[in-house]
Amino acid sequence: MGYPKDLLSSRSIIKPGQYALIAPEGLVNNVIPGFENCRISILGSPKLGASFVDYVVTMHEGGKNSEGYCGEEDVECFVYVLSGKVKAKADDQEFVLEESGYLYCPPGVKMYLENMDSSDSRLFLYKQKHNPLKGRKPWVVSGHANEIEYMDYDDMHNVHLKDLLPLDLAFDMNFHILSFDPAASHPFVETHYQGHGAYLLSGEGMYNLDNEWIPVKKDDYIFMAPYVHQAAYAVGREPLTYVYSKDCNRDATL
């Protein structure tokens, strides 16, 4: 990176156990065993207060994880392609994923990734412990978000939602894409049991995190702990859009 060209400063805000805004310019490389010719930054994690781990991965030409990722009997994982083209495998099932492509691997299934592009491919990667439901098991799911039609969010024509995984009770989490047209917003400030990890795909906006309004934009990462106030509205000339995880289909434990 070379010598700094200005005063050292950061837009990132870190409040462990509550929320975090992590701007891309402050990310550092983390060495993750099994990933070759890749730059990986750990975003959300239990050290921040999350029940999951999120990463942003840049796979350079020839980048791959030949040893596989996850595969433990109690861990599920998900990958979303931000840009580029990758070959993805779930054990013996193989998929070609381009921008907006995704793959979910249930517990016990390893995920293999390999860059198929001559330039970088960028990924948003996730894992968490699976909360099983007796008599039900999730399955491998793959697709492209660009091929899924938006639904109106809470009956608002200017806020749009996509579900990337099935709504079946076998799944204890889902990934969604939420998109706000310019000047659109949440219908109210939310306070709920679920936590989120969100990666901003486009646009600019203001995000309410614990009743603090914070400017956000494309390539930012947001962690929201359970019960933290949260809401957004879009500013600028393009939609504010992000992909995010959400726990679902389970009761609170004692």
Image (tube, helix red, strand yellow):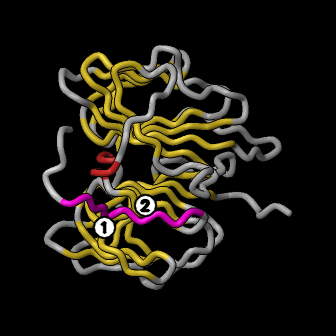
Question: In the rendered image of this protein, does residue 3 appear above or below residue 234?
Answer: above
Question: In the rendered image of this protein, does residue 240 appear above or below residue 210?
Answer: above
**Residues rendered magenta in the picture:** 7-16
Residue ID for mark 2: 222
- In this image, 223 relative to 76: left or right? left
Residue ID for mark 1: 216
**Amino acid under disc 1:** Val
Q: Position of residue 214 (x, y in %)?
A: 35, 75
Classified by dominant secondary structure, the portion drawn in magenta counts as loop
- In this image, 192 relative to 43: left or right? right
Q: Sequence order check: which comes first, mark 1 or mark 2?
A: 1
The residue nearer to you, when weighing 251 against 49, is: 49
Q: Position of residue 162 (x, y in %)?
A: 41, 57
Residue at the location (32% across, 26% down)?
Answer: 86
Question: In the rendered image of this protein, does residue 210 appear above or below residue 113?
Answer: below
Q: Position of residue 248 (x, y in %)?
A: 64, 58
Quadrant where the N terminus lies? top left
Residue at the location (18% across, 49% down)?
Answer: 4
Q: Residues within 10 Å of mark 1 (few under 14, many from 20)?
A: many
Verify CB contact (< 8 Å) between mark 1 and mark 2: yes
Residue at the location (18% across, 26% down)?
Answer: 119
Choose top left, top right, bottom left or bottom right for residue 194. bottom right
- Marks 1 and 2 sit apart, C-alpha to C-alpha, by 9 Å
